[in-house]
Image (cartoon, rainbow, N blue to C red):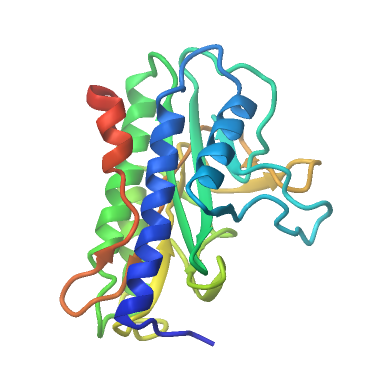
Amino acid sequence: MIFLKTDDEIELLRQSNLLVGKTLAEVAKLIKPGVTTLELDKVAEEFIRDNGAIPTFKGYPSPYGGSFPGTLCTSVNSQVVHGIPNNIPLQDGDIVSVDCGTLLNGFCGDSAYTFCVGEVKPEIRKLLKVTKDSLYLGIQNAVHGKRLGDIGYTIQTHCESNSYGVVREFVGHGIGKEMHEDPQVPNYGKRGSGTMLKKGMCLAIEPMITMGARQIVMENDGWTVRTKDRSIAAHFEHTVAVGVGKADILSSFEYIEQVLGDNSI
């Protein structure tokens, strides 16, 4: 069932999502060669709890095994999503996608950004830019009267026109009092197909795009998803409210990009 949110509920969602943006900005301050994703995770958890919220990923159940141990999903290079924070230092030239979720005032926040570690090859930076651009193109279609397929079609077309792969098995989702609500929001699709979008729907739109083939595999930890061909993957995510004529982006990359400056994607 799809729950339409009231204006008041959307404002509560905005508060939770802005906290995610501020948390990712705290993470951005630390990303450099030599830092571990476990260090990033510790800072994120402290920041979220200090702001009166709960990290929603921590303890999240899995159908494949144990619950998720971290506050952040930190997916490095060929890892697409759901990477578990660990003690392996990041290296110059790596990329790391950081996905973060919060629960504040009864509503969830969810957003992700892929960061460069040190000097990253231009072709990898291009993958990140195309993925981020596709997110905003998809968001342009999150308006009352359009259909879910319009979002996916726009993301897919932009990324595939750049010869990138669009992951099929993992998709965006509705969001509200629960982190994952109906409907599913694929990053592929046909124009004019799928559920009709209505004002008050809140969606987490999150393109997961690969430099090589789109096929993925799951690692033995039951969480980490990587590309089958070990090609690089990027992931950007915003939570938005469907509006009349224009979507309302509830999360924010502004705090992150104030930190990154010229290193913003």
State which quarter of the image contains the C terminus.
top left
Viewer-proximal residue among 129 and 262: 262
Residue under the image location 36 percent in, 52 percent down: 18
Residue under the image location 32 percent in, 45 percent down: 132
Residue under the image location 49 percent in, 37 percent down: 97
Q: Does any portion of residue 58 appear in the rendered image?
A: yes
Q: Image check: 189 left or right of 229?
A: left
Q: Image check: 265 left or right of 232?
A: left
Q: Does any portion of residue 79 appear in the rendered image?
A: no
The location of residue 91, given as percent across then percent down, is 54, 14
Q: Is residue 74 above or below residue 55?
A: above
Q: Is residue 91 above or below residue 141?
A: above
State which quarter of the image contains the N terminus.
bottom right
In the picture as drawn, the residue positioned furthest to the left comes out as 245
Q: Image check: 167 left or right of 138?
A: right
Q: Is residue 52 above or below residue 130?
A: below
Q: Is residue 96 above or below residue 50?
A: above
Residue under the image location 60 percent in, 21 percent down: 36
The location of residue 157, given as percent across then percent down, is 32, 57
Viewer-proximal residue among 207 and 84: 84
